[in-house]
Amino acid sequence: MSHRTMRALVLHGIGDLRVEEVPRPIPAPGEVLVRVAFCGVCGSDIPRVFVKGTYRFPLICGHEFAGTVEECGQGVTGYREGDRVAVFPLLWCGRCPACERGAF
C-alpha cells in the first residue's frame, strides 16, 4: 500500500466482497480524510451483500467508523491532523419533506 492508495472492502456484486487497494481520496475544501481504525457493519450493509437492489457496483462498504484525521482540506476548522474522530454518517437538511417525515 502506498501513500496514494488505501485498502477498502469493495462489493463487486451479490456475495462478491473483496479487500482491495483503491485510490486514496484527496480531501476537497471543507472535508477531512479519516484513517479508519474501526468500522461496523450495519443493517443497511447486509442487504447489499446478499440481496439485489437499486445500488450500483462496485460499492465501497462501511459508513459507520472511527479513526484519526489523516489530512484536512482547505478551510477546515475545528479538526487537525491526528485528531481522533467518530463519524456520524447521516446528513440531512431538516427542512425538506423527507426530513419532516423523519425519513433520513
Image: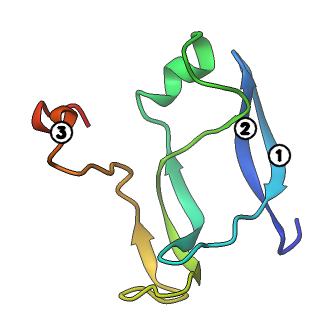
Q: Are marks 2 and 1 in contact (CB under 8 Å)?
A: yes
Image quadrant in which you'd find residue 18: top right
Residue ID at (59%, 10%): 52
For the N terminus, which image quadrant?
bottom right
Q: Secondary structure at mark 2?
A: strand
Residue at image mark 2 = 10
Q: Amino acid at mark 2?
A: Val
Q: Secondary structure at mark 3?
A: helix
Please report whichever mark, 3 or 1, sits nearer to the chain's N-terminal start: 1
**What crowding class fits label 1: few (fewer than 14 Cα within 10 Å), some (14-19), or many (20 or more)?**
some
Q: Secondary structure at mark 1?
A: strand
Residue at image mark 1 = 20
Please report whichever mark, 3 or 2, sits nearer to the chain's N-terminal start: 2
Q: Residue 99, percent across and down?
A: 18, 39
Q: Label for residue 99?
A: 3
Q: Is residue 23 above or below residue 33?
A: above
Q: Is residue 52 above or below residue 13?
A: above
